[in-house]
Image (tube, helix red, strand yellow):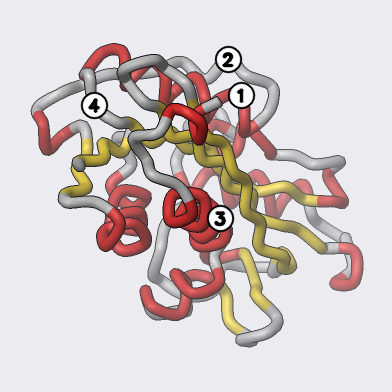
Amino acid sequence: MELLIATSNQGKVNEFKKLLGDRFDRVVSLAEIGKEIEVEETGITFQQNAKKKAIEIAKATGMLALGDDSGLVVDALDGAPGVYSSRYSKQGTDESNIAKLLKNMGGVPKEKRTARFVCALAICNPEDLNTVMVTGTCEGYITEKPIGNKGFGYDPVFYYPNLELTFAQMTDDEKNNISHRKNAAKKLCKILDENNMKQTSIWD
């Protein structure tokens, strides 16, 4: 069985291939099947956006589709940037988003710089468009400046205390062992492992 990752973000595609590659015969991206499909993120929650992506891509391609929506939730900013993480700044680049975040966090002491990455995953069966939904999180802190040159998005300013590293300082294996996407994928794999994927009961 093939799984289509419903995103054009190559960083996410690479992570999902590592996280889910052993559960499917093949994990592919939209680019790899020659499709350019943009799904407008109109939901007010990560879960709504992930489900919308999965359903629309499954309908458009006839393939089992995995939709995700993930982002950064900062307590001192009342949950911002949240579902607007990728378009937090006017330019919408990783650098400009981080710059705006750090500016808005100016003067916030370390103990109040708590934050978490959130990942909502929805996998949609193209035959009936039923979905399975899971959510994973990873807790950390926002640094006062970018540290590290790996990863993407807010990785350089997200500090994970258990490893004493930002996400941008971690190896791929270190990050994939503890990330929000890892935790969501683990929940999804548990559901798929406990059920026959062809049985409609798991999609209800």
Of residue 79 and residue 28, the one placed in the foreground of this image is 28
On the rendered image, what quadrant is the N terminus found in? top left
Q: Which residue is mark 2?
A: 42
Three-letter code, disc 4: Met
Three-letter code, disc 2: Thr
- Whichever of callouts 3 and 1 sits on the residue coming sooner in the sequence is 1
Question: Whole-Å distance between the Cαs marked 1 and 2?
Answer: 8 Å
Question: Whole-Å distance between the Cαs marked 4 and 3?
Answer: 21 Å
Which residue lies at the image location 85% right of the left edge and 72% below the top edge? 110
Q: Which residue is mark 1?
A: 48
Q: Which residue is mark 4?
A: 63
- Labels 4 & 1 near each other (Cβ < 8 A): no
Which residue lies at the image location 53% right of the left edge and 36% below the top edge? 69
Name the front one of labels 2 and 3. Answer: 3
Of residue 71 and residue 55, the one placed in the foreground of this image is 55
Q: Residues within 10 Å of mark 2 (few under 14, many from 20)?
A: few
- Whichever of callouts 4 and 2 sits on the residue coming sooner in the sequence is 2
Tell me residue 144's x, y (percent): 71, 68
On the rendered image, what quadrant is the C terminus found in? top right
Question: Whole-Å distance between the Cαs marked 2 and 3?
Answer: 25 Å
Figure disc tally: 4
> In this picture, is 77 found above or below 141?
above
Q: Which residue is mark 3?
A: 187
Can you tell which mark lies on residue 17? Answer: none
Three-letter code, disc 1: Gln
